Amino acid sequence: MEKRSAVILGASGIVGQRFCQMLSNHPYFNITGLFGGSASDGKKLSEVLRLPEYCISQTELLNERINHLDVGSVRKIDPDIVFSALPNDLAREVELDLASHGIPVFTNASANRMREDVPLVVPEVNSECLEMAQGKEGYIVANGNCSSIGLALSLKPLLKYGISDVNVTTLQAVSGSGYPGIPSLDIMDNLVPYIQDEEEKMAREIPKMFGSLESGKIRNSAIKIHPTCIRVPVRDSHLEVVQAAVNQDVTPGEVKEAFRNFISSPQEMGLPSAPEKPVVLREEENRPQPYLDSMAGSPERARGMAATVGRVEVSGRIIRYVTLSHNTIRGAAGGSVLNAELMFKRGLV
Amino acid sequence: MEKRSAVILGASGIVGQRFCQMLSNHPYFNITGLFGGSASDGKKLSEVLRLPEYCISQTELLNERINHLDVGSVRKIDPDIVFSALPNDLAREVELDLASHGIPVFTNASANRMREDVPLVVPEVNSECLEMAQGKEGYIVANGNCSSIGLALSLKPLLKYGISDVNVTTLQAVSGSGYPGIPSLDIMDNLVPYIQDEEEKMAREIPKMFGSLESGKIRNSAIKIHPTCIRVPVRDSHLEVVQAAVNQDVTPGEVKEAFRNFISSPQEMGLPSAPEKPVVLREEENRPQPYLDSMAGSPERARGMAATVGRVEVSGRIIRYVTLSHNTIRGAAGGSVLNAELMFKRGLV
Amino acid sequence: MEKRSAVILGASGIVGQRFCQMLSNHPYFNITGLFGGSASDGKKLSEVLRLPEYCISQTELLNERINHLDVGSVRKIDPDIVFSALPNDLAREVELDLASHGIPVFTNASANRMREDVPLVVPEVNSECLEMAQGKEGYIVANGNCSSIGLALSLKPLLKYGISDVNVTTLQAVSGSGYPGIPSLDIMDNLVPYIQDEEEKMAREIPKMFGSLESGKIRNSAIKIHPTCIRVPVRDSHLEVVQAAVNQDVTPGEVKEAFRNFISSPQEMGLPSAPEKPVVLREEENRPQPYLDSMAGSPERARGMAATVGRVEVSGRIIRYVTLSHNTIRGAAGGSVLNAELMFKRGLV
Amino acid sequence: MEKRSAVILGASGIVGQRFCQMLSNHPYFNITGLFGGSASDGKKLSEVLRLPEYCISQTELLNERINHLDVGSVRKIDPDIVFSALPNDLAREVELDLASHGIPVFTNASANRMREDVPLVVPEVNSECLEMAQGKEGYIVANGNCSSIGLALSLKPLLKYGISDVNVTTLQAVSGSGYPGIPSLDIMDNLVPYIQDEEEKMAREIPKMFGSLESGKIRNSAIKIHPTCIRVPVRDSHLEVVQAAVNQDVTPGEVKEAFRNFISSPQEMGLPSAPEKPVVLREEENRPQPYLDSMAGSPERARGMAATVGRVEVSGRIIRYVTLSHNTIRGAAGGSVLNAELMFKRGLV
């Protein structure tokens, strides 16, 4: 199949640059334009890059200039597909405008995530909801909040035990606050037990992700999420301490087996950015750790796309475990790229 | 009343040095000997000090030499009281030996904490258990694990609501692992979701702390603690995310009021190291934070002795909050000093 | 003598808050107004405080409201003295305006530092330059850049050896970039070998600080400074690695003696914020360190006011050493407070 | 040419694991044995791994067991070549023993570095000294201290200007202290201006590296190195601030050109671990930085093998610049691997 032309919005930000990383030399997509805010206007990607340069394997991309974001210009380019890492205040209108002009938009912004007509898709969790886009020329597919994605991935294999309530404490990396994001004086040798809107997002997104598609609409799951979100002095990856109440008896062995055996459509379809296993189970008592596990996932293109789960325990009908996933790869750019790969493989973009 | 002579065991370690800090120029106690391991043998306190020097307000203490630990030498000094920050393998025998020779031992070691004849006391929580020592000449009083103490302090005002189960995720500072403790390569820009024995300690200590004294013996409380302990790249203070299941309805306002109004014996008796309020309630959504709140507590001698509580919420019959306390002050040396002050004030040492 | 009324400009910033700390319960000055930018307009100091609360010993100050900065309102208050921690773009005009209206301004801003009519004073280095203010009603006294102050303090005792060239590498803490200052993503687990304008400031300020006062004007010293300034992931204190070329032979012992014996006017006059010794010499091979030495200086009011020097060596006619000083205390607020104390004690404010 | 069998000594340490990384799937060498201390005895590499697993591209290596180090067992295996990351106390004898039994040893240990019969080789700097090994069956080739290697690489292109004296301040990462290495309490939010033996090593190694080979012996260069070494809270890479005194006039443009054009034997021979450019010149004022530049070097196998130079300035006859290199790749394992590749390509192993 021919490669699709792709434009990245918000290309100068932390997530935008992860889009550049994941889409460089991509087998399905071809980057034909980078757009960003006025601060990066006309600058080369290399001039605003906050990742080590080797992350961009398609090296000529480093010399690509970032265009001033203007929805008219984007439309004029008429890409086959748009990846959006826009800030929320811009995202709402720009994404709707592009979709209404027939362009599929795969977004990491939260602005349109909860709209009734926008599927909120974690590919291994609810790819069936992409159906909502079928038949449409333009549409928006949202990927979810970084902390929701990691949690949803790890809960999915346990759904069969009937999850009612989930208590979760998140330890979230600073890259989740974007750039410039959280000031060093606020987080060096410190912890901040609050992240604006984060707990609300988790509480409302997971029920939508676990919802069922009924006559073209999503009916939210009744699952209840009780999150406490904490910013920690770590560069990348969110670690989440989870207690999931289930409504049947289950052994630790069964739970581990469920994690270990879990695969889903992206794996079955052999998508390029799909990790062999969406959840890597570790038996060591001191894992997962950001330094060791944030880039879990193979093949190389899927590094950072697997969640790692450890410390699995069961007490009564509470399953307890710790999960870790890369917040700007799996929890942001990578999630949208995988959504787009799914749609491409199904011939829908 | 005359000052009591006090000897510090394990004086060269992180907790031992906090004992030096808290006992320097103390109104009740007078340091008459420092004892430590072979590495610090004969060295001056200043030579092994890992705190800024101004922490030791009694400056001549900096020139005090650390003696080789040998239980015979300690006994020969015959101090009125011993503070122990010994490693566990040494603590068990040394502390029992000293107690059996008529010396009261206030210990931070965990070795003898769960013995039937050793009260495990957080002064604001269960000072009545000090009764167990009454009438004895020598005895051991233990203070509890750093993460247990912080949790117990914050749970105490909620006991009246009937706490059955407590789920807690701890984010623990590196000073909790002592010196040299956790290597920098393990924790810089990283998180480790496991601390050896820590969860077990919390699960067994809290029921003893909340136990009732029945005919000279402690009958453990039925409260159940479910901890997940995580090491984080922060120098001092443990932050704990708590969900406490209670058996009656309660409003957030009532819970806050309970925290705000909480005082106990140390406050009533005006002990020198007692903070005005054992629990400081913060209403800001992003507190407590280690950098801002670890030294909570006034007067100056009580800095680091108050736990700070924030983010109080109630969902159903679950009370949710975050608490923070200084692990080597409130959670270690300071806890034992306050126990000793209680005993002194009651004329029992 | 009666206390002087003092107003703090830029009170909500990092240096402004250090002014609040150092002037709370001050024996000479009485804070009568806090002024800040629009973000802190009308807020209580406690609401914008980025220091632990116990730093503000005059606790009612925590409830003081920060007024909108407006030079007219400041003038209306007509304080005896103004402390300025304004950003440079504002500082230039505001400070000149206040001085021209007869108000003495002690500033940490760099805007007016190099003006011919503004003395640039490090109290232990060139207090004689305060003479320039004598007889004037309103004037500006500048204190110098944080990295210049630390360097000047440590070079002063060596001036007698005839310093020609100084090579210096600075390792500067993040608080030096103010708030929000350097983003955590830029500095966590990282180093940035560049700080805007910093090297230029050092190169031009030291010659003025070491200049001579000739008929009311400062004639710059011929000393040459070659700095390389690096931002490091440390919260407070600048460490500077110095090689000073002198024009006579000197032994390490003599250099150490010079550091050890150094005192100056603030010490002789017994100023409240003057450290007993402006330079603390450490003989341990691994000192100074930010964690251990940033708060050097006694009495308590002078904590953070002493520079610490270590690793003194001499090779040929190059004196090599490492010095450390607290960048927002000694290198900012404290420097200006000490200047003001000097003027007060001389009866000039 | 056939692959050579290679054994790694000290395989469980930080540098040993970098040997595993760099030699996995290596085109010239085939790992046939891992040896380590008693702590890792019999464990799989994956069980002691302190690198993310994806670093080991030859995944079956993760299941390789680490043998108890015993020189007899190593000899019995009779590898074509040995890579040593042994601690110094062991290295001296073991390496000499193996060499005397006809085995070429490429070592990162410092124990034998200064021996007259051991070439101390940075491949791009003095590969001609490898001649000393020619004709011998067994021999030792040393690679130099991590901070010396980075400095030597960057000085080499400037040698033609006649370097007499080099002043250097190093900011060294914690991985340089090995594992467990520097305790987190010593370095978190802190700097330590001293690293045992480090300055001495730099001062004596650089003259040997820049020495000339005269009738089979190295005659040291007269270059003088004046280092101050500082440990900083960064995981990997050493940043060095250099002032090199040269004995001719030179412009910044010429210096940059010299850095830019620098290539040497490893590049000319197209060695697999040779970076395209041993020195990467950055013109941005805020580079090099550990996070962005530590993995400089392409192709992929050479990541972390290039030094990055920035902030080039000339004042008088002093060339000033900042250089950064990965301490455990370029400055340790990678240096030895490149030495071995050179010997292999020349048919000498």
Image (cartoon, coloured by chain):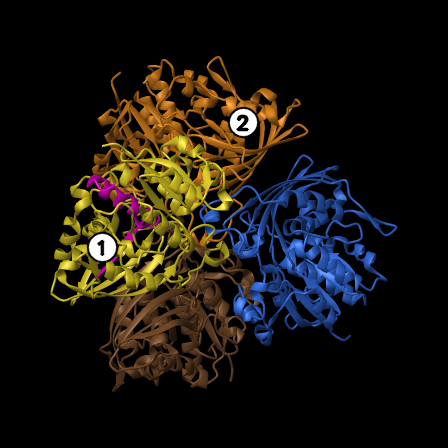
Chain colours: A brown, B yellow, C orange, D blue
Asked which quadrant contains residue B316, the reply is bottom left
Closer to the camera in the image, C323 or D43? D43
Instruction: Give the residue displayed 54% in from the left and 66% down from the top.
Output: D49
Q: Horizontal placement of D227 versus B92: left or right?
A: right
Per the image, the residue denoted by label 1 is B154
Residue C155 numbered tag: 2
Q: Nearer the viewer, mark 2 or mark 1?
A: 1
Instruction: Decide whether residue B329 is among the magenta residues.
Output: yes
- Amino acid residing under circle 2: Leu
Question: In the image, residue A136 lies at what x, y percent?
Answer: 34, 82
Q: Which residues are magenta?
A: B320-349
**Label 2 with label 1: CB-CB less than 8 Å:** no
Report whether A120 appears left or right of D151. Answer: left
Q: Is residue D115 above or below residue A292?
A: above
Q: Residue A68 magenta-drawn?
A: no
Instruction: Count the numbered circles shown.
Output: 2
Q: Chain of mark 2?
A: C
Is residue A10 at least partly visible in the picture?
A: yes
Front one among A301 and B236: B236
Amino acid type assigned to the residue bearing label 1 in the image: Ser
Instruction: Locate the C terminus of chain B and report the quarter of the image it occupies.
Output: top left
Residue B119 in percent (x, y) is at 25, 54
Q: CA distance from mark 2 to mark 1?
A: 52 Å
| Residue A248 image-quadrant placement | bottom left
Q: Quadrant of the N terminus of chain B?
A: top left
The answer to whether A248 is drawn above or below residue A238 in the figure is below
Determine whether the residue tagged by mark 2 lies in a helix, strand or loop.
helix
Circle number at residue B76: none
Describe residue C346's horizontal placement relative to residue B153 as left or right.
right
Q: Residues within 10 Å of mark 1 (few under 14, many from 20)?
A: many
Q: Residue D174, percent across and down?
A: 54, 52
Question: In terms of secondary structure, where does tag 1 sit?
Answer: helix
